[in-house]
Image: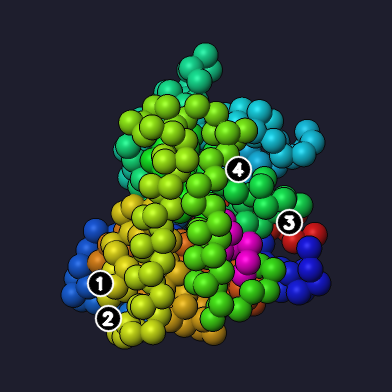
Amino acid sequence: MTTTTVRKRAASGALIGLALGDALGFPTEFKDIPSILATHGPWRQMELPTPAIVTDDTQMTLALAHGLRAAMDRGLLAPAGMERPVREEFVKWFRSPDNNRAPGRTCLVACELLENERLPWQEASQIGSKGCGANMRVAPLGLVAALSDEQRAGAAQLQAALTHGHPTALAASDLTAYAVRLLAQGAGPAELVTLLRTHAHESRSRYYHRWLGDLWTHSHDPSPEHFIARGWDECLAILDRLRLAVRTASPEDDPCLATGAGWTAEEALATGLLCFLLFPDEPLTALRRAACTSGDSDSIACLTGAFAGAHHGTDAWPTPWADRIEYGGDLQTLGALWDA
């Protein structure tokens, strides 16, 4: 880990940021912009709700984080060592009485199947789904500094594939974790889209057999390379839209008009990034812009918070906000572990 990352406490900043975005966007999800403004006032003045309750986005981020921690306590992160504890944490979340925040259907269906320990996880994966549930939870894999590029990418795709098996869900999750990692390590916002496009081009025909096994055979693709390329091509297309939007979109317009409503993984990535890149030096403004969107506001703002927090660290967030976010103690503990 670089000295810059230690100084700014990127992991803590990203985890708190994603939860704050989640809580800020929770009340605005499924609403159009006029309705949000009528209820919450000018978007630049939006305040954190009281109580600051999060959704399944933060809950599943914590499930992944605890699964990763358990896996890495046993040694180097590898597919076999990661799959079981993450699977167990996802099932634990599925059965929790706190799983009452309107989670996505794909996660519910897949996690119910994952509960059958005799069922290979590839058979539980929803191969046709590329919902944003795949990558709204992936930030921890960009924050664990000890991972190699292959571990980060393979693990990001595996955690997505446990529930969302569509190749675009895998590629978007890989890109999301990579963006968090780049920002935590000190990459500048101005170079971020170019770095992500380069990564997408380089990854386009790379299928991680060690991490994904025979997942591709559950689709109708003629080869694993064809399968994964479909996902990267959709991500490259949305990154092109994002690159244009960063130059041309008005901060006062709904970001969903430029890069999509965020219900799918690639759109959640792009619109979450757009909100961050419109206000790279104003993390709270970025979070408020993300929460005041006509699409999947909590997931968009969750990702925006992860990006802004990884970039700025804990100083991005007001202490009164950070101190009252739900699951704050758990988030702070994990952040401190990965910042150490």
**Lower position in the chain sequence, tag 2 or tag 3:** 3
Q: Which mark is residue 155?
A: 4
Q: x and y percent of residue 284 in the render?
A: 48, 78
Badge 1 density bin: few <14, some 14–19, many ≥20, Cα 10 Å? some
Q: Visible in this render: residue 266?
A: yes
Q: How much space separates mark 4 and mark 1, taking CA atoms?
A: 32 Å
Question: Which of pointers 4 and 3 lies earlier in the amino acid sequence?
Answer: 3
Task: Please name the residue that numbered disc 3 is placed on.
Answer: 145
**Residue drawn at 25 percent across, 72 percent down:** 257
| Local secondary structure at mark 1 | helix
Residue 221 in picture, x, y percent from top left = 36, 34
Q: Is residue 45 visible?
A: no
In the picture, measured across the screen, residue 48 lies left or right of residue 148, that is left
Residue visible at 55% across and 29% down in the picture: 213
Q: Amino acid at mark 1?
A: Leu
How many numbered marks are there?
A: 4
**Span colored in magenta:** 176-183
Asked if labels 3 and 1 touch by Cβ distance under 8 angstroms, the answer is no
The circle drawn on residue 5 is none
Which colouring convention does the figure follow? Answer: rainbow
Q: What is the crowding at mark 2: few (fewer than 14 residues within 10 Å), some, or many (at least 20)? A: few
In this image, 51 relative to 178: left or right? left
Q: Which residue: 47% across, 62% down?
A: 303
Query: Which quadrant does the N terminus fall into?
Result: bottom right
Which residue is painted at 42% across and 41% down in the image? 226
Residues at marks 1 and 2 touching, judged by CB atoms closer than 8 Å: yes
Question: Is 182 colored magenta in this rendering?
Answer: yes
Q: Which mark is residue 253?
A: 2
Q: In this figure, which residue is indicated by the disc labeled 1?
A: 257
